[in-house]
Each structure stands twice: as C-alpha cells, then as structure tokens.
Image (cartoon, grey):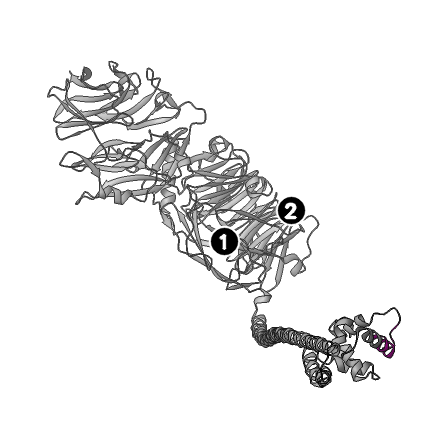
Amino acid sequence: MCRTLLFLFLLYIASISYAQELPPIKIFTPENYKAQNQNWGIAQSEDNLIYVANNGGLLEYNGEHWQLYSHYSNPILRSLKIKKDVIYTGSFMDFGFWKKNDKGLLEYSSLVEDLKIKLKEGEEFWGVNFYQDWVLFQSKTRIYFVNRLAKDVKIIDSNETISGLFVINNTIFFQKKNKGIFTLENGEEKVFSDANFFRNNKVINCFYHNKELVFLSEEKGFVSVKGNDVVWKETDLNKEKFSVFSAIQLKDNSFVLGTISNGIIFLNSEGKITSTVNRKNGLSNNTALSLFQDKTDNIWIGLDNGINYINISSAFKIFEDEDGDLGTVYTSFFFDNELYLGTNQGLFFKDKDLKYKIIKGTEGQVWFLKEIDGNLFCGHDKGTFIIKNKKISSTIPEQLGTWNVKKVPNNKDILIQGTYQGLSILEKQNGVWKFRNKIDGFNISSRFYEFYQDKLYVNHELKGFYELKIDENYSKVLLQNKIHVPEEGYGSNVFSFGNHLYYSSSKGIFKKQPTGGFSKDTLFTNVLNDIENITTIRKLPEKKNTFYSFSNNNILFITSNSISLKPQVKRIPIAASIRNNVLGFENLTQISDNNYLIGTSRGYLLLNDAIETKQQDIAISFQKVLVNKIDDIKTNLSLAGEVVLENKQNNIDFSYSILKYDKIIKNEYQYQLEGLSSNWSDWSENSSQLFENLPYGDYVFNVKGKYGNETTDVKSFSFSIERPYYLSNLFLVFYTLSVVFIIVMINIYYRRRYKLKNKILLEKAQKELKLKELENSQIIMKLNNEKLRVDIDSKSRELASSTMNIIKKNDFLNTIKTELINGDGKNTLKVIKIIDKNLNNSDDWKMFQEAFNNADKNFLKKVKDKHPNLTPNDLRLCAYLRLNLSSKEIAPLLNISPRSVEVKRYRLRKKMDLPHDSNLTNYILEI
C-alpha cells in the first residue's frame, strides 16, 4: 500500500515537473510468448504464476519463460479468472477450467461437455466471475451459473445484449443494452437502474469507491446512482475524450483505465489524471484490452498486440530522450526549484511546457554542476559559467575546459579550479567570482584533486598521481612529487574519507600512511571485496562522508559508521544496460532527500531511495522436468515425490525460475547435481539445465537463484535411474553363478591341463629317457661293435697269423721233405713220416677252425646249413676260400698240390650247384 501511494505521489509530481519520467516497462511481443496478438484477460495464481487469455490459448508466465496451453476444439480464449488453484476460462462455444497435474502441467476440462450444457449457436463467453460457490460465465445473451462441485447449472437468458457482468460486495450487476443495469435477488433478475445514462452508455466496470458504488462508462466517465438519479462524478475524464475499454481499481483506491487508442490512464482517488502511458512514452500498443494488478502491486496490460508490464513498485523512473535533444547527461543539479541537466550538448532546464530547454551560451560539453555559496557553477568545455535564474550571470573563460571547482581550506574568498591545463584560482571580488591566476609549475589536466593536511593531491588516470606543495598565495607549485601506488588501474580517483586520504582504482583502494606512502586499505577492501567492476568512487556533495559508485548490477552508496568511521556499503540492484552510463563519467546527483538522478547516454534515471528495494522474499521453484531417451520425445515428470527412471531415460532437462516480475536486472541461477558432482556451477542467467546420458544411480538436483544481492533457498529434486537390465539383481546373481561356474570350469580345465601337461611331460621325459637309453645303448653297442671289430681284427690277425704260420710250417716241412727225398740217408724215411704227421696234424686245423670261428662266427654252420652234403674237407676249403686265399696258398694247408686244390674247387662247385659263370670265391665271400 505504501509503495503504491508513494508511486502515485511521484506520478503527480511528475505531472508537474517530470512528465515523461516513467517506471520501467517490460514489453512482451507475440514473438516473445509465441502466440496470437490479442490478450483478453490476465490473472495471477496462488503460486504467483501469471496467466493470460490469448487468441491462441492460455499463456503461462513464470518470470523466465512463456508457455502456451490450448484445447484444440477452440483455442481462442475471451475471458479468464482464477479461484484458488483453478483457472476458469471462456471461449467460443465453450467454457471450463484448467488445473495442474502432478507434473506441473495444466489440463483442461470442459464444463459444457461435463455438465452437458446446451449452448446457443455461435455463443462466446466474454466474462468470468465468482459468486459464493458459483462460477459465472457471461456471453452476449446469457449468464451461466455453474456449481462445479454440485454439478448444478442455472441460466439467465436475455433477448437484449448483455454488455457487462460485475460482482461487487457480494452483489451481481449486469447491463442489458438499451435496458439498463440489473441485479439478481433470489435467483431472479431485478432492475437496478433503467436511467437513460445506462440505456445509452456502455458500462465498462463498477467499483466500490469512497463508500459508494460507482460505474465507469465507456466515454462519459464515472457516475453513481442516487435513488432514481444518476450523479456525475467530477474527474479529469470529463475534460478529455477517451474511449475506455478496460479498467481496474488499485489497492489504494486509485484507478487504471485502458483505452481504445490512448494507452492507459492513471487516476488518483480524487479523479485526477496523474499520468498517461501510451506508445509515445513506453507502451508497445495503444489499445488496452485487459488490465491486472499483481501481488506486488504492479500493472499488467493485455494489449491488442502484445503484453506489457509496468513496474510501478520500482524505485526507478526512466526518462528517455526520444528525440535526442539532450544528448548524454554528464551531470545534474536541483537548484532554486529547478532541475538542471549538463550534457554533451549544453546546460538544460525544464520550461513551462515541461520540455527541456537549453540555456543560451552553454552550447557544448558540460562537465559538472555545483553550488557554492548560493551560486551554481557550471564547468564547461569553454570555461566556467555561473548560473542564475536559468541563464548565465557571469563567465570565467580564461581557463578553457573546467573539470571541477572546490573551496580552498581556511579561505572562503578563493576557489581552486581544475582545468585541462592544470590548476587556477578564482577570487570573489565585490561579490562576483573572477579569475585571479593560474598556479604555475603544474600543467597536467586536473579532474580529480583533494586537499589533505597542507598539500594538494592531484590524480590523472593516465599520467599519474601527484603530491603538490603550493605557496601560501596559491600562485605557484613549490614542490611536485609523483606518488608510486602499489597497483594502478582504470577509474582512478583521490578522495578523503573521515580523517584519511585514499586513492582508488579498479585494483583496489589504497590509504595514505603516516610514513607518506600508500598501501591497500583493509576496511574498504573487505566491504568491497565481492563486488566486481567497480567504477570511479566519487563523493556525494550533499552528504558528508557519503560516496557513490557503480558495479555490474548495482549502485553503491558508501557511508561511514558514525562511531568507528568504518565504511559501509548499501547496494541497490540495477542492470548496467538500464543505467547505460558513459564509462569513466558515471554520475549521480541527489536532487531531494531520497531522490537521486543518474545520467545516462539516452536521458536519465530517477532513483527513490525511500522505496524499499526488498519488496518480497524471493523463492525459486521448478516449472517442469522433462525426460527422454535418445532421439525420443520428451515427457514431463511428476514434480512431487522421488522419481525412478528407466535406464535409457537418462536425458533429463530441468526448468526453474524465480517468480519475480518487478525486476530491473536479470535473475541468475546456480545448480548442483549430487551423484554426478559435488561442485556448484557458476552463476548463470540460464533458467534450465540439460543432463545427457547420465549413468545409473541416485541423484539430487539442487538449484538456487539470485536476484541482485538476494539469494533464494535451495530447491531440490530427487530422482534415480535404474540399472540396465544386464546389471539387475537377477542378472548379477546369474553373473555371480556364471563367474563361479567359469572359475570352477577354469579350475577343472587347468587341473586337467596340468595333468595332461604332466602326462605329456612325463611321456616326453620317458621318451627322452628311452631315447637317452637308446643313445646310451647305441653308444654301448657302438663300443661293443668297436670292441668286436677290434676283437675280430685281432682274431683275423690271429687267424691270418695262424694261417700263415701253418702255411709257412707246411712249406718248410714240404721243403725239408723234398730235400730228404732227394737226399740219401738211412733216417730219411723216418723223418719224412714225422713231417707227414705234422703236415696232416688235425690240431692245426682245430686251432685254425677256432680262430676262424672267432673271426667269422657261424660261417661254417651257415655253409653247412645251406649245403648239407659238404664234407669236413669241403668246409675246410670253404674256410680257406673265405679268407680269399689262392690255390697256391691253400695247397700247403691241405698238403696237396695246387692242381689238386683246383680239382677240389671244381668238385666243391659241383656240390654247391653253382652256375658255370658264378665265381666260387665271390659266392663264399657273400655268404
């Protein structure tokens, strides 16, 4: 209530002075909400969602996204009203209700079909209202009373057109064209007023205002009924020509009217027009088909083409320089009840027509505006101007390009002026400020400078930070010292806070130490540590120890604790795109106790610091959770209870939002998926998050939101993804048994393989042993054979030796015998007998036979077996032939002549039946 009253007061002030300063307006086009142009009704549910009756169906808005619901029999909705958690809508040839299922999706039920209501052909339902347990649906010729729970229906039929249906203070009113206003009593219609006014003028709405019932007509303004008379209400509508199409009464009893061609009109409770908002100053369309005030007191407008939202509870009002007459605002000041704006095009004030007008002679760049001793100083590219009565009273052009003017400590009659070429002194002469002298010895552009103790500190963002000692007369610099700052950055400045001197830049805030150097200040660092991209810190002249700056999405007011002088920071959220300052020339001016002006490149913003910036506790909620298999259609999940998904349903998409509509900065979100990662994501403006191909397991999706400097509680959604069928318990038992079976089989296999291998190794070893034994036996055999060969050779030598001995003996004996025969003596015969006995000695044969058998074992036996008819003498001849002896050598052995040996050989051939061409010796040798 307080916010609305304050807003209306500001609008009233705006109508006097700042007529074009409007609260932020959010525009939604059909391309944004992806439906049709026209929007016939707006309402808000208990869970703060916004619903709009659109030609394309029912629109739902969650602060981030629009969603369109449609029942395809007829998607065009003409009316909308919400009671508790049920949304009632009327359309062409149908009316019914929508309700959310456990998946967060709206489902439609047709009351016409459910209750078998017979409608008139072509009937459309333009109004929905509630009366006790009844829901009222109004068409052009009927009013249907429906008790959904009792399944009861009552119908009021009319031959005349019903142009409106209203329920006020538990009383039903409706208008019949050309008949008047009617009410219902005990289910019967009764004339409330049949005055000509109600017969001839369409009633848009009726309200209970100032303890009386008032009716708002389409073109004739407000009236009330006194008995049988119609009483006109004196309002500004009576002075204007407006065609009203829709109207609502705000919570503070003021009104907002939607017109056919003039946008929307704000009327206070006294009937004064406080503001008109149309296409020229912010709306996207001038035809307002429907109006609605939400729970945070802000206004929604259903237009003939789109939806607009006016954030009247905002602490900001916006002035857009649509024609570009002002240019970029660099400074501002409220002086002598006039608002002055210094821009890149000159110094402006607002004239009696509430238009900004330039002060002649100030054309060009204005850098600052400051009041000193009742004079308004204007720092300009051309020098310094002093302004009075909306014009230049005096000019100080000696030093071009004035950045700033400050008082000199302990001397009220001189001012120090920072210019493009250094520093100069202004002196008050006969009550007029004039140029006195330039301070010699320092020619660097001096935009930021500060007196501290007995020195002057000047900062130039690019050239450096200087400490100057100036003479007592302020005519020249006695000592100049360039100060080293630990970290240099952009947006640098020098200022005093409390009893200390500070140097600030994007790298931090540094405090002057008693030793003379600068080091980072811990107090400022701690309070500003979490703020990113702080712009130049500047003093707010109207308040002691108060400074301002800007960050990404905040205006910062830096003040001191009254006891400890510890810096404190107040943050007011605002999007950088809205404030749209010139980098390095951000400016903010206090124009009244709680009102500030912020210059932008397209105009300016008005900030009312008295409006509580924390207008409601922010909360985050899930809007929908979608799940799908790969390349499959997405389906919605239930938002209540824990969800168990099939293994292939491992692609899950979360949508969430902060249900806050009166925002001038974007919401940010941070999420975490327990079960996948314990880390939180970075803050992002994305209000949805998709996870693909999640492995099976248990998960908890956590999300939290942030609006400006406020953070919501964590919202959680638990779900599980089943194991794949091949990892189910049954399969795990199967896998376990399979593994055990495989292990057993492997064990058996390896046992068998071990045994087989051992067997093979054993057999191999046995073979190797046998082979070794065979090799050994062969070696032994070889040795035996060698021994035998040696023995045979020995025996052969022995046989040969024996044979030769016998031959030689017999030759010797034969020789002796021959000599004896030829000799003469009486003992000769006896000697011959002895020799014959020795020649035919069987012992020689036995000895020869034994030696022969040792050398050629079994030869004689083989010959005997082969030729049984051989005599011992034949065998003896065979043995000699075996030795490959010639007939001449054999003859002495047999004690016969060689001729006789030949005869014996011939006979032996016969006995052996050898062919004529066979050689006897060769045959015997081959046996």
The location of residue 712, given as percent across then percent down, is 39, 53
- When the figure is inspected, residue 163 is found, relative to residue 419, above or below; the finding is below
Return the residue found at the far top: 398
What crowding class fits label 1: few (fewer than 14 Cα within 10 Å), some (14-19), or many (20 or more)?
some
Within the image, what quadrant is residue 879 found in?
bottom right
Of the residues under marks 1 and 2, which one precedes in the sequence? 1
Numbered badge on residue 399: none
Quadrant hosting residue 902: bottom right
Report the magenta residues as a range. Answer: 905-915
- The amino acid at mark 2 is Glu
Q: Residue at x 46, y 43 (%)?
A: 299
Of tags 1 and 2, the one toward the viewer is: 1
- Mark carried by residue 160: 2
Looking at the rendered structure, the secondary structure element under dot 2 is loop
Mark 2, other Cα within 10 Å: few <14 / some 14–19 / many ≥20: some
Q: Residue furthest left?
A: 472
Mark 1 sits on what residue?
A: 45
Q: In the image, what residue type sits under mark 1?
A: Ser
Query: In the drawing, does residue 107 fall left or right of residue 659?
Result: right
Does the rendering let one see residue 274? yes
Q: Is residue 749 above or below residue 665?
A: below
